Amino acid sequence: MKNNFFILTFLSICFTASAQLKDINIPQIWEDYKFYPKMVPGFNFMEDGKHYSVQKSSEIVQYDLTSGEQTSVIYSAKDINFSSYTFSSDEQKIVLETDREQIYRRSSKANFYVWDRKSEKLTPVSKEGKQRYATLDAKGNKIAFVRGNNVFYKEVNSTKEVQVTKDGAQNKIINGATDWVYEEEFAMSSAFIWSPEGTKIAFLRFDETAVKEFTYTTYNNELYPIYNTFKYPKAGEVNSDVSVHIYDLVTKKTTQVQVKGDKDQYIPRIKWINDDQLCVTRLNRHQNDLTLLIANPKNGKTSVLLQEENKYFIDVHDNLTFLEKDEFIWTSDEDGYNHIYVYNMKGKKVRQLTKGNFDVIRFYGLNKKTKELYFQAAAESAMNRGVYSASLAGGEMKALHTEKGVNKAQFSSTFDYYVNTYSNATTPPSYKVYETKKNQLVRTIEDNNRLDTQLKEYEMGKHTFFEFTNPDSIVLNGWMIKPADFDPNKKYPVFMYVYGGPGRQTVMDEWGGQNYMWFQMLAQKGYIVISVDNRGTDARGEEFRKSTYMNLGGLETQDQIDVAKHFASKPFVDSERIGIFGWSFGGYLSTSCLAKAADVFKMAIAVAPVINWKWYDTIYTERFMRTPKENDKGYEDNSPINFAGQIRGKYLLVHGMADDNVHFQNAAEMARALVAKNIPFEEAYYPNKNHGIYGGYTRSHLYNKMTNFVLDNL
């Protein structure tokens, strides 16, 4: 009798403790950001490799990397409110950016100033209007910038501007900056670069006159809205005509580089080797033939340094590193996985520095003193990331990370120290400083223990990884969150989360951020949440990553349908209640799944989806599909607009009306097609919001809408 009492008391305590666990809600996630970890956004390492600088309000403050202690105030603003800063190479001058106006994802314009630390003088770069990409030369004496689509430069202490180009015009000619599609798909917005000695400026010129225009509308509570018109080349349409030019500050002459090749091609990168050699990356429109050219600044003549061809496509990167011994570092899929190579200046491969059935994900750089290079790789599995070193002379690579999950590094300027950012699926990120040579922990900057402890107050579903073998015998990685009180004898609805686009992943052993907490909230409400990386995603070698070539969306959709069917057969799953959600490419896949598997999915949410691949941009779409003229079947078979009439489940279509990337046109045309077939659906459109759909209460509003849609329809 006494034992029973103690057992009952123990059970009562356990039940009470469990009952006290808190529920997660949308305001906590998207208004209070209660579960948002403390972030260390990145380090502006000083040249000595032992200090870094941080902007704190109106000051630039220097800290000791090893102790975290403040060592000095480098700059304190008096009259300007700056938003970012960059140092000259000798750190004696600072370029300050103020009054920034965002243009697209990476582009902006602003007023720039130069602060001279020695004279303590603040000089405006220009008084003639806002500038773009104000950049000091290596000696810090001159500064170049773009204004009105033209390139300018001036002596820092002079008011006299030298106009390098004069033909810049809105929606016609761009000098020194990129057009929309280069910015979005080649991740570049500035398109000029100083030579090492500051005697020349190399720049790209975009003639976008023949490129067709797209217009989106901004609503501002005025009588008439604002129409924003810009050049946007859609699949198969005319691109900008891009050329490379070099301006000589001594002779005041501009020389055009003889890029040759096809006229319809891309110039995604330019990089100085030395003051007398410019390296130009040329890529054909199919993006499967890449050439590195060496240009002579005096006459513009070029010679081939390296040519690489691929039966699929070649991804552009920033890993090209020129060495002192007339050699350079290059990364390539040459052996079926992305690895690091050394070539000589005759374009001959000298040695392969990394080998194995894994992809190098990111090249961090080379310590020229120790001849060690550092990089991130998925050597343990596609779901993990590690930080590694290897000798430039060759040999086995060495792991620097100590914990399994996702590790990301940022190295100091001298490579003496690095900051490792680590997280796993259930652990928020930590930031730790390591001494590189001995790989010893120096200090912890932030461990997010507060958030980790706070999460224990909430009822959290169990997060597990699993493998799924599709009908083609290909193993796919996935994760699953089950309700905390999961009972295998009950049947649960399944909510699938997908992105699935080329070179991306949702199944990683890393902290999932705000979406992870939303999925946990849905698990609290009785849903099993799963995500699977289909074919075409990253970190599993070239054949897996490029297997969807010319058939973008086909295999990806089938993989997601097969995953849903697999779970529908499980005894703990209600096969009549399977839904899917995705954003951007994920929204495209969720729509495609609902349209092509009406018997499998009960509902789908699509945020900012591509509905017809013919309506997306040239560089991205043609990289995987070629042009509609060359691959009409691929476009027609994989565009959801053509299958709108097959939708039977509940469908929520969401889009930002100022989306310059995936245009609102996609949502409008899908809605039109659904209405034409008399198929019911729900829609949520966000005026003045771009592809990210954020700002103010926007995310809270959106996630409330999606949550209610799930609760009502799944």
Image: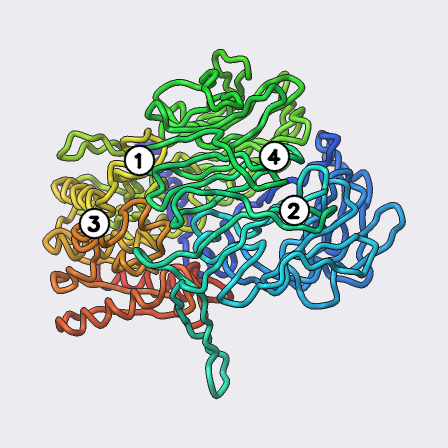
Q: Earlier in the sequence, mark 4 or mark 3?
A: 4
Check disc 4 and report its element: helix, strand or loop. Answer: strand
Question: Farthest left residue?
Answer: 599
On the rendered structure, is 506 left or right of 678? right
Q: Nearer the viewer, residue 112 or 164?
A: 164
Q: Residue at x 28, y 34 (%)?
A: 311
Circle number at residue 545: 1
Q: Residue at x 19, y 46 (%)?
A: 554
Identify the residue position indicated by label 3 in the image. Answer: 631
Identify the residue position indicated by label 2 in the image. Answer: 201
Circle number at residue 277: 4
Circle 4 or circle 1, nearest the eye: 4
Q: Nearer the viewer, residue 229 or 48?
A: 229
Q: Nearer the viewer, residue 11 or 75?
A: 75
Please identify the quadrant where the C terminus is shown: bottom left
Quadrant in the picture for residue 538: top left
Q: Earlier in the sequence, mark 2 or mark 4?
A: 2
Amino acid type, mark 3: Asn
| Rendered view: 31 above or below 62 | below
Q: Give residue 617's position: percent from left, percent from top.
A: 36, 56
Q: Give residue 484's position: percent from left, percent from top.
A: 32, 43
| Rendered view: 541 above or below 511 | above
